[in-house]
Image: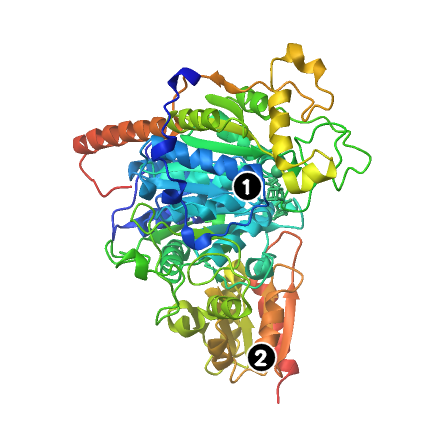
Amino acid sequence: MSSTIVDSAAEFDVRDYLRKEMMPHFLCPGCGHGIALRALLWAVHELGMDKDKLAVVSGIGCAGRLSAYIDANTFHVTHGRPLAYATGLALARPDLHVVVITGDGDCLAIGGNHLIHACRRNLKLTCLMLNNEVYGMTGGQVSPTTSETRLTTTTPLGNSEPNFDACALAAAAGASFVGREVTHHVPKLKELIRAGLAHPGFAFVEVLSDCTEIFGRKNELGSSAEMVLRQKSELRPSAYRDTVNTPFRSNDLPTGVLSKRDRPEYGAAYRKAAAAQRADAAAKDGARTGKGEF
Amino acid sequence: MNAVDKLPAPGAALRLVSGNHACALGAVAAGCRFFAGYPITPSSEIAERLSRLLPQVGGVFVQMEDEIASIAAVIGASMGGVKALTATSGPGFSLKQENIGYAAGAEVPCVIVNVMRGGPSTGMPTRPSQSDIMQTRWGSHGDYPMIVLAPASVREIYTETVRAFDLAETFRTPVVLLYDQVIAQLTETVEFPDIGDDARAERKWASGPREAYQPYAANEDGIPAMSRPGGGYRVHTTGLTHSESGFPTQNPEAVARNLGRLLTKFERHRDVIDSWQALDCDDADVLIVAIGISARAATRALATARAKGVRLGLFRPVTLWPFPETALRAAAKTARAVLVPEMNAGQLELEVQRILGGKRVYAMHRYDGEPITPADIAARAQALAQETAI
Ligand SMILES: Cc1ncc(C[n+]2csc(CCOP(=O)(O)OP(=O)(O)O)c2C)c(N)n1
Ligand code: SF4
Ligand SMILES: [Mg+2]
């Protein structure tokens, strides 16, 4: 994908897409979610998307708070349910471009059921899951993506639960576009999100983001800059993996577009079947007399 | 039934339908164009009917992965500007509560049908009950306003479904349509009234320049105008306590002002919201207060008792919440005793006691899955008439 990167950074001004009245934002210094938000808005800009037609639905959490900063139609809904709200909105309003912003807890724990069914249904939606391995908003509890042995406020002995590979999960559930990127590579992240936004079905994009203030502090991962650099050392080819002493994430986490499938888009398929039924009914009605009969 | 299910022509002749079928027809007539649901007895026929009806009128039907997803999708569709419905029964209604509170707080119109079956828990899926009376009012956390309509016949399910949408749109609120399994699956001959195709209530939509628009402005009637995505307003909707701008706030004055408006927004519109039936109340010695199938049994009891010279009256709230209290007080004027027959362990009784403080309020409870019979009500009411005779 890197070959298609066009450097539009010069003419992209993130402030054109933010609600200035909401500044200053509430994210902690160095939080990866802000980087992800910038990458999303950059992709929106590059695609020339109409802000009036952009709908952003977000759940509850630090990730969920991001929608409020975007100058678009924004919906901050209940914990774990943004994909379900977005499903209704996108089905009712196919003219809108619906994007979901969700956290690892929002998307994979309380909202896990909605995720797998959204993947299966393949309605046109872009789901941006900001994975910081932790419940940031509630003060740093263990999440379904916390690496084993990591310390959180509810795993004082070190996490002993295996974590989800969200992309593998989404792909297995049928998502027609799955990709992962890190906040370390903003242009690449922007490219991936752009590809997800342009995808004609359900696109799942996982962003490896850092909760610097809580997760980083608890696990002594250093400054936010050090945490971002750690992403780089950890995500290089696995042959070099052994040279890294304290892997930030213990799993093998490939990045980029991880899977793409050509599947019928749910909304279009439904509307087509409904139109065919209406045409059929109209033809039958014409042949019959009592039109008011039921 | 083939894939195409016929819609009734306005003002059409008699038709034999079930309560749930009437609900589906009423929804389409009211302009509902989105349904999301999850199967549960005894409400599933509403979903099945709408899966056939909605595509015919350019609407969307979707079966979601659970009831939480269903109400979420319904609110999502309504935030997109489309009239939307979900239908369920006890266990599913419990699951929907958090998001019903979201719709109430963010003021997103939608209609939720709860067909009551025996509880608690999985209870008696195929047996009737009236045990969700309090849950429909208080089921979600926090303080919030709620409108609940309680039809008692198949025809009334049709007309109240239409009214549920009208009230939801007019007052930007979730509305619950609450009825029991008996009338849900009862098949009656219904003459579909002409509800006037073009007279349906529409949400108050935002107009004017974006800069001057406040998504939660009180306006003169206490009902903020909603903006349709795509219309250029680009607003924020949240379940966090918000100010007139729609953005979160914890400023005590802003919270008091905005939550205060929300909590009282139905009060000055009670003339439109309140609805009830008062039968033979003018000279009643014993007043019966009941809803749904219990009210129908009471209607029969009234006739038997009157034939024997016992003066019974019936007060039936059609709008169950907010409870039509002024009308109840008026209906109870001459009554020496009030009898509340209900298929639960005592819920409606509590509200009647609250409103008619000082009157003698007696209850009849039944929660074994069988409806209360006209004979049971007549016998108890006649005994009360005698006991309280002056
Ligand atoms: C039904 C419900 N349960 C719990 C909460 C509390 N809560 C708020 S945010 C959150 C977790 C957020 O974690 P994540 O989705 O990973 O987002 P992050 O803050 O890390 O970005 C929880 C449990 C809630 N708001 N609602
Ligand atoms: S708590 Fe963590 S995730 Fe939340 S804003 Fe702070 S650094 Fe970011
Ligand atoms: Mg998180």
Determine the CA span between mark 1 and mark 2: 50 Å
Find the residue positioned furthest to the right: A157
**Residue A63 numbered mark, or none:** 1
- Within the image, what quadrant is residue A260 found in? top left
x 50%, y 58%: residue: B105
Q: Is residue A104 above or below residue A79?
A: above
- The chain under label 1 reads A
In-front residue for pair B284/A215: A215
Find the residue positioned furthest to the bottom: B390
Query: On the picture, is B115 further left or further right than B214?
Result: right
- Within the image, what quadrant is residue A198 found in? top left
The image's colour scheme reads rainbow
Task: For the C terminus of chain B, give its image quadrant.
Answer: bottom right
Residue A280, percent across and down? Answer: 25, 28
In-front residue for pair A152/A216: A216
Where's ligand 1: which quadrant?
top right
Read off the residue under disc 2: B356
The residue carrying mark 1 has its beta carbon less than 8 Å from ligand 1: yes
Mark 2: which amino acid?
Leu
Residue B93, percent across and down? Answer: 56, 49
Secondary structure of the residue carrying numbered label 2: loop
In-front residue for pair A74/A215: A215
Task: For the N terminus of chain B, give its image quadrant.
Answer: top left
Secondary structure of the residue carrying numbered label 1: loop
**Residue B286 numbered mark, or none:** none
Count neighbours of disc 1 (C-alpha within 10 A) and say few if under 14, some if 14 to 19, many if 20 or more. many
Mark 1: which amino acid?
Ala
x 49%, y 30%: residue: A118
- The chain under label 2 reads B
Residue B234, percent across and down? Answer: 36, 49
x 27%, y 27%: residue: A276
Residue A161 in view here: yes
